[in-house]
Image: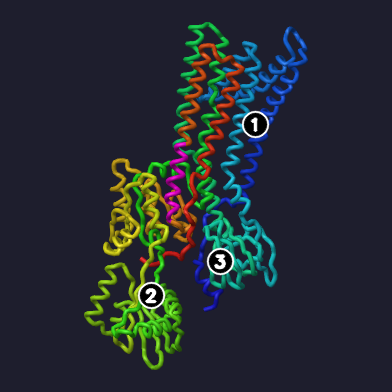
Amino acid sequence: MSTIEKVEAKIEPGENPASLESSATILQRLRIVRTFSLGRRYPLVAFAAIGILIGLLALPFGVNLYGQGLTHWIFALVTIVGGAPLVLATLGELLKGHIYADVVAALAIVGSILLGQFEAGAIVVLMQAGGEALEDYGLQRASRSLENLLKRAPTIAHLAVGSDYLDVPVQEVNIRDVLLVRPGDIVPVDGVVLEGQGAVDESALTGEPVPLDKLPGDELLSGTINLSGALVMRAMKPAKESKYELIVKMVEQAQTEKAPISRLADQYAPGFTFVTLALTAAVYIFSHDWMRVLAVLVVATPCPLIIATPLAVLSAINRAARLNIIVKSGASIEQAASVELVIFDKTGTLTIGRPTFEQVISITPGDENRLLGVAASVELFSSHVLAHPLVEGARKLGLQPQHVSDFQEVAGKGVSGIIEGHRYDIGSDSYLRSIGVAISAPIQDELARLHSAGSMVALISEDGRAAGAAVFSDQVRPEARTLRQRLQSLGVRRTVMLTGDNLVAAERIAALVGVSEVRANLLPEGKVAVIEELKRGDTRVMMVGDGINDAPALATATVGVALGGHGAGISADAADIVLMVDNVERVADVISIGRKMVSVAKQGIFFGIGASIVFMIVAAFGFIPPTIGAVLQEALDVVVILGALRSGMDSHPASAVSPPTAPSGVA
C-alpha cells in the first residue's frame, strides 16, 4: 500500500467536524473588545489626570475667581464632568437592583461636589477611572499567553491545485486537501506527511525541546513550525478542529468563565457597602461633621479592589498555559487547589504506554540470541505493536536481519515466515495453539508467571514446536517516581491507582511510583463507581488519565486531568484540565498553581477590605481629611490589583519536561 493510500485509509468517510471559531476570529474579536474597552475608559483617566496636573501647576499663581483659586475651579471641573458618567452608571445599576461597592464611590463624588471638596472629588474620579484602567492592564498581562497563542496560530495554507500551490486562508482547508509546508512555515492543520523530509519544532504544543524529523506517514500538528525541508502533507482535520485551534478555544473558554473565588469576592461587595453606609450614618449622628462623613466615603471605595480579584484567576490560568497546561475554567483551577486525593490510571499515565522489549527466553540454554534474530527477521514485516520493539531489541545486540520467505500475518494475532528452510511462528499462545503448535506444561507455567507480573509475551515456535518467548513490559514514566513526593509536599496524602490490568501487575507499578492504594481488574464503569465511592463526604478527588476508557472517570471526578499530548481526544474533552506535555508530573504543578491562586485571591479580598475598614475608622475620628483619604485609597487599590497578578508568577521551577512518548496502545 502506498503512503497516500495509507493516509486515505486513516480518514473516515463522512467526517464533518463541529464548527469552532478560528483563532484568527478570536484574535480579531479580542482586539475589538479591548479597543472598545480602552477607548471608553482611558479618555476619562486622561481627562482626570491632566486636569489634576493643570490644577496643581496653577496653584502657585494664586489666581482668584469668585473668591476661590483657579486650582479649585479646575478640580471642580474634573469632579463634575469626570464624575457624572460614573455616578449615572452607578444610578443605572441601582435602578436594576444591583447594589455594589461603586455606590460608595458615587456618594463620595456627590458629597465632594455638595461640600465643595473638589480636590478629594477629583482624586476619587481619577481613582475610579484609573482603577479600571489598571484592571485593563492586568487583563492584558494576564491574557498574554492567549495572545501569544493567537499570534502564533496559522492563517495561510499552500493548497495544491493541479500542479501548482495557491495561498488560501487556513479556514478554507478541508479534509483530504494536499498542502505544501515550506521551511519556516507554521503547519496549518493537523495532517500526515505524504512526501519530503523535514525537522519540525513541536515545543509549543508538546514541550519537546528537540526538533523532530518528519518522514512520509508521520503526523503533523497545526501550530508547529517546519524548520527545514519542504513537506507535502494531507489534511486530516479542518483548521477549526485541529489541535492548535482546540488549545486556543480551551484557553479562551477558561478566561471568560468566572471561578467561584470571583463570585465569593462579589458576595462581599453588598455587605461592605452597607457597612460603609452604616458607619457614615453613625459618624454623622455622633459628630454632625459632614467632612468626616465624606472622608469615610472616600477611603471606602474598593470597587477596583473587588473587581480585581478575578485577575488572580486569569493569571493562574495563563501561568498554567505557559507550562502547556490548559485549564478549561477558573472553577477547575480553584477546585484543584483543594484536592485531597489523586487517582491515577496506570497504562499511559503512570507508565509510558508502549511496550519495551526485555528479553527472549529459550527452551535451549544459550540459544536466546539466535531465537531473537530469527523472530526479529520475521517481525520486521509486521505492523503489530510488539514488532517494532522486538526488531529494535535485535538491532541493539547487533543482530542482522535474515532473508524471510512465505511471510504471513494474521492481524492482531501473529506472524509466520520461513528462514533457511525452517518455519517460525510468533504470536500469542492462543494463536499458536490454533495453528497446531504444541505448548508444554513448563512453558505454560512460565507464561502464567510472566502474565501475572504484568509482562506481555509473544511465543516463538520453530517447525511447529514452542522454542521460547519474547518478553515485553510497559515502563514506568521517569517523572512518576518523583511525583508522589511532590504531592506529599503539597499536602496530598492519599493516592489511588485504577486499572483494568490484573492486581499483581498493578501492585508492581504502584510500588515503583509510591501509589498507596490499588484497585485492579476494572472496566470503565468500575472506575466511575470507585470514584463516586471515594467522593463521598465531600472529598475533593482528582482523576488523571489518558485513554478513551478514562473519559467517564475524568468526567465523574471533582477535577479531571487528561494527558492530552498524545492521548485520546475524547479524554481531553471530558477533562477539566489538559496536560499538553506528556509529563505526568505536571499534575503537581496544577495543584501548586491552584493553591497559590486561591491564596493570592483571598489575600486580595481580606487585605483590601480590612485596610479600607481601618482607614474608615481612622477617618471617622477626623484624622484623615478627604483629600488624603482619596490618595490613600488610590494607593491601596494599586497595591491589591497588582498583587493579584502574583498568582501568575513562577513560585518554583517547573517540573522537567520529558520527551513525548508514543500513544498508549497496550493494556
Vertical comparison of 467 with 72: above or below = below
SS at mark 1 in the image:
helix
Magenta range is 584-599
Provide the residue designation for mark 2.
412
Dot 3 and dot 1 residues touching (CB under 8 Å): no
**Point 59% across, 45% down: residue:** 144
| Mark 3 and mark 2: Cα distance apart in space | 29 Å
Q: Is residue 593 magenta?
A: yes
Per the picture, the main secondary structure of the magenta-coloured stretch is: helix
**Quadrant holding the C terminus:** bottom left
Q: Is residue 315 magenta?
A: no
**Quarter of the view holding residue 627:** top right
**Point 60% across, 73% down: residue:** 195
Vertical comparison of 49 with 436: above or below = above
- View extreme (bottom): residue: 421
- Residue type, label 2: Gly
Provide the residue designation for mark 3.
212
Nearest to N terminus: mark 1 or mark 2: 1
Provide the residue designation for mark 1.
41
| Mark 1 and mark 2: Cα distance apart in space | 65 Å
**Point 73% across, 12% down: residue:** 69
Nearest to N terminus: mark 3 or mark 1: 1
Dot 1 and dot 2 residues touching (CB under 8 Å): no
SS at mark 3 in the image:
strand
- Residue type, label 3: Leu
Horizontal and vertical percent position of residue 386: 40, 74
Q: Is residue 549 left or right of residue 71?
A: left
- Residue type, label 1: Arg
Q: Residues within 10 Å of mark 3 (few under 14, many from 20)?
A: some
